[in-house]
Structure formats: C-alpha cells, structure tokens
Amino acid sequence: MLDSFQARATLSVNGRDHTLHRLAALAPHAAVERLPYALKILLENLLRCEDGVDVRADDILALARWQPGAVAEREIAFTPARVLMQDFTGVPAVVDLAAMREAMAALGGDPARINPLAPAELVIDHSVMVDHFAAADALERNAELEFARNRERYAFLRWGQQAFDRFRVVPPRTGICHQVNLEYLARVVFTDARDGLHVYPDTLVGTDSHTTMINALGVLGWGVGGIEAEAAMLGQPITMLIPEVVGMRLRGRLREGVTATDLVLTVTQRLRAHGVVGKFVEFFGPGLAGLPLADRATIANMAPEYGATCGLFPIDAETLAYLRLSGRDAAQVALVEAYARAQGLFAEPGAPEPLYSQVLDLDLDAVEPSLAGPRRPQDRIALAAARPAVEQALAQAAAARGAGQPGRVEVADGGYTLADGAVVIAAITSCTNTSNPGVILGAGLLAQKALARGLRVRPWVKTSLAPGSQVVTAYLEASGLLAALEGLGFALVGYGCTTCIGNSGPLPGPVSAAIRQGDLAVGAVLSGNRNFEGRIHPEVKLNFLASPPLVVAYALAGTLAIDLTREPLGLDGDGRPVLLKDIWPSAEEIARAGSVISQAMFRERYADVFAGDAHWRAIATPAAGRYAWDAQSTYIRHPPYFEGMTREPPGFAPIADARVLLRLGDSITTDHISPAGSIKRDGPAGRYLVAHGVAPADFNSYGARRGNHEVMVRGTFANVRLRNELVPGTEGGVTRHQPSGETLSVYDAAMRYAAEGVPLVVLAGKEYGTGSSRDWAAKGTRLLGVRAVIAESYERIHRSNLVGMGVLPLEFPAGASRDTLGLSGSERYAIEGLVPGARSVTVVVRPDAGQERRFPARVRIDTPKEWAYFEHGGILPYVLRQLAG
C-alpha cells in the first residue's frame, strides 16, 4: 500500500488509538471540505486503498478536484468494506462460488483461493410465501411450508457458511435484509485489526437493489448484480466513473396526516422526471432537522425507483440517536461520532452546504397523501385524484376484454359480487415501510379505530402483515396495536418480503375462479416499493403502492374505485357513514404509541440473530470443502458458465447473421426478463420440473429456483405480462422464429436458433432493465444465446450485469429507436467495428428481401475494467483467471 499524500494519522477514541486516512491531508492539493459527503467517502476509500495499480495518486487527485458539472471520464476503483445478500440472489452467488472452485481445480489452481476476502452477510428473507393469512397460526404454518419447500436451498447455504470464511447467514423468520442491516448489521464506521487498528467508513454493495436503504445512516452502499458482488467478495474492486451528485434540498415539515410513504412517492416522481440514472443523490437542507431516521430510510430505500445509484443522508445527531435506540454499543457510537467529525463527514446545522452537480428543492409541507400505480412506482397519484385514474385504467381493461363482458361476477359460495377494481390483496409488506414505526403504528391505530366503529375488511380481500424485523412485532404488541390489526385480518404471516417480491401466495379459490371467469381487472394495494406488471400476482392487473394506513383503508373499502378523501369506507354499527378522516390517527397519537419503543427491544431481538429457530437448526449440513453436486437436484445445479474455460481469454467473437429474439417496448423491467414469482405448469420451466418428478404444488417460485440454471433459462422472458412486438396482441413468453414465422415459447425458439448456430439480439426501448438487481436477468439472457441488446437507454444495474455476463449493451443513436429506424425484427443483424475501447459500432441490418441498412450504435461498456471483463467473457471468468494466474 502506498501513501502518496502522508494521509495516515492517529485517532484516539475509547482509550484506543486508531489509524485513519485523513481527507485533510489533501488540503494542499484540493479543496475537499465542500465535496458532497458521498464523494468524501469515495475519496477516503481511494486514499486507503492506493496501491499504484487499481488506485493511483492521480485517481485520488481527480476525485479530490471534482467540480460540479464535470464530465464523468475518470474511472475509479471502489473497494467496499462488506457485501450484503438476500437468499434469492445469495443462493446463485454461492452456487457460482462453488462452481468457481471446481473451475479453479480444472485450471490447475488452488480451489481454496475462491474464498471471500470481504465480510459477506446473507439474510434469508425472500422465500416465505403468504399461503396462510388472517389466522393466528398463519406465521407458523407459512414457516413450516417455507422450510419444507426450501430445505435443500437452506442446507446449501449452511454448507456455504462452513465452506467459506467471513460468510454469515441470518436464518429465516428474522427479518428483511435491509431492515436487519439498518437495525443491526451496519457499523457506520468500520474497524480492521490487520496492520494496526484501522478505522474507516462502513461501505457496502448488496445483491438487492434496495441495499440503498442503509444510506439513511450515512453508510454509502448500493445494489449490484450477484456476479459483481461475488467479485467484490473475492477482492475485486468495483470500477465506476466519478459520478455526478444531485442534491435535493429539503425545507419545512410534513403536514398533519401526511406520511413518509407520501413523501417518498413524491421524491420518486420528482427525481425520476429529473433524470438521475447512474447518478448519486444526496439529501440536505433545513428539512433534515425534523426528518426522523426511519423517514430517511424510507426515502433512501427507494433510490432504485427514482433511478439513482444511491440516495445518501449525512451522519448527524439523528444518526447517533438512532444508533443508541437500536442498541448499538456506546463505544461504537462514540467512535462513529469522533471519526465522522474528524473526517468532515458529520453534518452540523448551519454549516456551508456541499457543492452539487444540480440542486432540486422540495418543500415538505407541500407533500400530499398519495399512492402510485397501477404499474410503476414513479407514477404518483394524489389520493384525491385516485378514483379518476383507476376508472381510466378500468375502462382500458374493459375495452381490451371486449363487449359482452360485464366486468362483474357473482361469487355464489361467497355471497358477494366481485367486480373490476376490487381490491383482492392488501398487504403491509416490504422493507420500505415496515422499517418505519410512524406508518406501521399509524396502520395499527387506524385499524383500532375502524374496529371501534364496527368496520370490517371486505370478504374478497386477502390481508397480510409481514414486518421487516421482529422489533416491529415487539412494539406493536407493547402498544396493543397488533391485536387491532389482527382483528381486521392483518395477522402476522412471516418476516420477509412476501407480496412485494411476488410471494403473495394463491388467492382464495372462489376469488381466483371469479377473476378468471370474468377476466376481471382487480387490484392489489401494498406498502412496498415495486408494482411492476406481473410481479405482485399473475391474476392481479392493477397494483398500487401506498402507506400502511392506506393499505388498511383500501382493505376496508374493498375497491380501488373510490375517493377516500370524500366517500365513506363503510357504515358503522348505527348505519352512519365512516370517512377515512374520521379514523385517521393524529401525529400526537402516533407519537404516543411510539413511546413504547425501547433499546431493550432491539437488543433482545438481535441477541442471538445467527442461531435461527428449531426448523433451521434441524437442517443437516453437507460437509465443508468442495460442494458435492447432486445431478438429480432441481434446486442446486452445477452451472455451465465455466465449461471449456481456458487460461487465456477468448477475445471478441464476431456477431453476424443474428436474429431478433424479442422486440420490446419501454420500461422493460428485470421482472419482465426474469420473473421471481410463480411458475406456470404449461410453460417450459413447469414442463421441466414435471419431467423431473416435481408436482406443481411443489414448484415453489422462480426466485427460489435460481440455483438451477435449467429452470431459470426456461423462465427467462416468461413474465405473463411481457408483450413481444414480434407477436402482436399476445402477452407472455412467446416469440416468432425467423425465417419460419412459427410462434414458439421464447425458450424453445432460442434452443432452435442455437441448434441452427444462429446468434441472437434483443431490441428494446427506453429504461431497459429497470427494477431489481437480479443478475439472472443477464444470466438467462446469455444462456438463451443473446449476444447483444440494442435499447434506447438502460437502467444502471442491468447494463452492468449484461457486461458482467459477456452480453453487449448497445444504444440506438440519440432520438432514434426501433420504430424510427424501421426495424421490424424479422431481419438479420451484424455488429461491425467491435474492438476494445470502441465508443460506437455499426449495426448492419439485412432484410430477407430488400436493401441492407446501417446505423451507428453507442457501446455501453463504460470503463476500461468493463472492457477487460467483456474480453474475458464476463466478470467471473476474469476474476477466476486472475486468481488462477
């Protein structure tokens, strides 16, 4: 390690001397005091990791001299302190590491070198489903099903915990990874005893896009694909261009009756419209003083929804107060404060504002009650305007359904009519809001008042409460509000993402049958962060994000086609109408209920967080070492990424005579590309499982099957709401094989093309790959034989994942698209001019009949390191060759 700027110094805290790398050491070279906080953290990272190879003195100076408006041209290497995973993305990551050990042995290297160098923590939170609900024993019954379905996956993770150093697993029934990270795992300031006692900022990357939630504590972290996280675990720095940093200045305070959810939906709409993809966002200004840490976490959590790499809040007095409340050791809190102040990372009221690339202003007192939907989280609707928006969506659904369909079905056994717009799922779920006592207690108080007025949830609504940690249950019980929520059917169903990730479970039989019979356009209301098409439930077409109190309110109303600001939720015991405003809790009532939250709750619930319950402890663990692959397993299979791998990289294979596998529109999400929810029996993945002896009742979900590439490649582009323009008028994973014109499943068409030796491309519109960080959206694309994607624009994580899997991301020329260029998708394609470092290539389009056309396309391989990854066929082959060499 070099120290070109003599930055090492001693910080004495708690009677111990710590070594830090002083940002002030750069004062003779640059004015760093008014850099955004995020860039200060990156700058410290460069100072500490300077080695003359990955990090050089001129990289440090380039970042230290950053100025607003600077063009991002300098590549820097960021080395996170740790890695965070959840089980849907963590299982395939551990599968890859196990396969890399096999490949290392095949290359003649030492398999033990495939071992995490950075601490990695995995929280199992994505596997519990809402099979049982509205019952006192729903939690236990869902847990029993979860362990029965996922025993093999969980045994594999227990193997990984023994086989790899610095890898820890938080068992099921504990909480959601981001809330557990916020409440327990985050250090805020990290210490390392190697080479003296070093102290530095806690930083991380996570295999879930909502890793950004930890930005609320002043911890810099963001979501990456699993393959990039694996590389980070193995000591590979994350390469990036010095980012733009957008500042959002907050003023004022939220008005009475306005929630943190309303605020984050407003922030999401504003920032998405402004355009912050690939940028950092920081929140600052006088409004921070009245913004609790929990509200900050809600805003930071949804950075992927507003498109930013991260949404950072500075360390300040509120940070320290939260650390104390959540049971962090007093010595750690003292270290956080001393280090942050020493490095200029502590935000003091009245201090000069940092300099930003752009500054947006938001008056908190202008935020109004809101929800977002029916398909995207950035599509905020004022609550007062919700009914017209819903009625417009229902009219569109009715038109698509055709004449003669009344939009309502009598449910004979239920004694009610199910109609378009009915709320069939109402879920208090997701890390975004279940981490926030204000909105959770607000939901409990609203439920309590509704019960007192004699209101009940409509019989067709599937209700659920899935907290992000056991601390939530503790304070709901202590405040007496858990019983109120249970009284309306919001019984505890599990500690996990549940409905937000698509694990909403089956709808009751009569409800499901009525939806199918009438082709009804029904809805879900959830307190989550994502409402993409086909994500929440395959039978639910309209999905809205809302605060937990509004989730309860819509469950009481039973329909989306209502103006909650004016129309009654129902009638009380005396036949009088009850309006939402009549039972909405006041800020004072919420604060009084929140007074029960104590440090003891956190310490008790996290006292033995890695031990797990009896279900977890009873799972047999395979022997450590190299994994014993089971060729009959339908959950864990040896992946094919390293088959035939040589010590030297293969270079760039030409792309010629390629066919278009799919022609897609705007806002194609990673859920469209690689769904996480239920597996259809009659699709390629379902047929594969049946052929391998798996009954449909045991299919589990795509998310749970990510350790088996055979299932996942068959599920790629299999979302039931995917619309492929090669097959107009259809929904689902189908395409048209060229030149035969035959309509096939995407998987079957891809396999036919592979047998014919035909490479594939995908054409798409704007914001391709929005949503979750799932690397399977890139892995599945590559395994289908797709060599390049040509889109109008990309979301950050998916573009990086494509490069990491050796798939070429290209962009149409500015202002051009598949439509303006007249690309039908029936042509043959070639890519010319692809050489290392190329900024653009020429796409040659050859119709089966007619003149060939050419157009330039921008190459979205953004850094020299990414070019190295691409030349090696992906990031994992690159890392493997480095370690083997």
Image (cartoon, grey):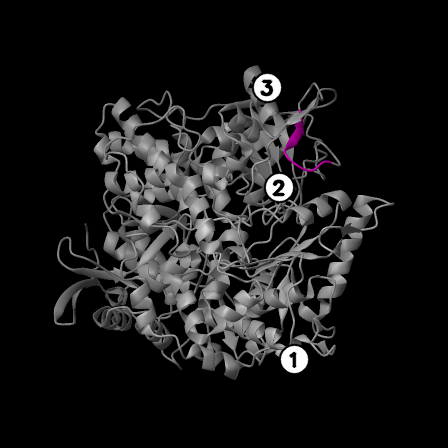
Which residues fall within the magenta stretch? 730-736
> Residue tagged by mark 1?
582
Residue 769's disc is: none
What's the CA distance linking mark 3 and mark 1? Answer: 62 Å
Residue 813's disc is: 2
Q: From the viewer's perspective, tell me whether residue 290 is left or right of residue 751.
A: left
Q: Quadrant of the C terminus?
A: top left
Q: Residue furthest front?
A: 413
Q: Position of residue 840 (x, y in %)?
A: 53, 37
Q: From the viewer's perspective, tell me whether residue 660 is left or right of residue 571.
A: left
Asked where in the image residue 637 lies, by quadrant, the reply is top left
Q: Position of residue 27 (x, y in %)?
A: 27, 67
| Residue 280 seen anywhere in this rendered image of the structure | no
Asked which secondary structure carries label 2, the reply is: loop
Asked where in the image residue 35 lies, by quadrant, the reply is bottom left
Rendered residue at 41%/24% (across/down):
632
Q: From the viewer's perspective, tell me whether residue 52 is left or right of residue 32.
A: left
| Residue 116 seen anywhere in this rendered image of the structure | yes
What's the CA distance linking mark 2 and mark 3? Answer: 31 Å
Count neighbours of disc 2 (C-alpha within 10 A) and say few if under 14, some if 14 to 19, many if 20 or more.
some
Asked which secondary structure carries label 1, the reply is: helix
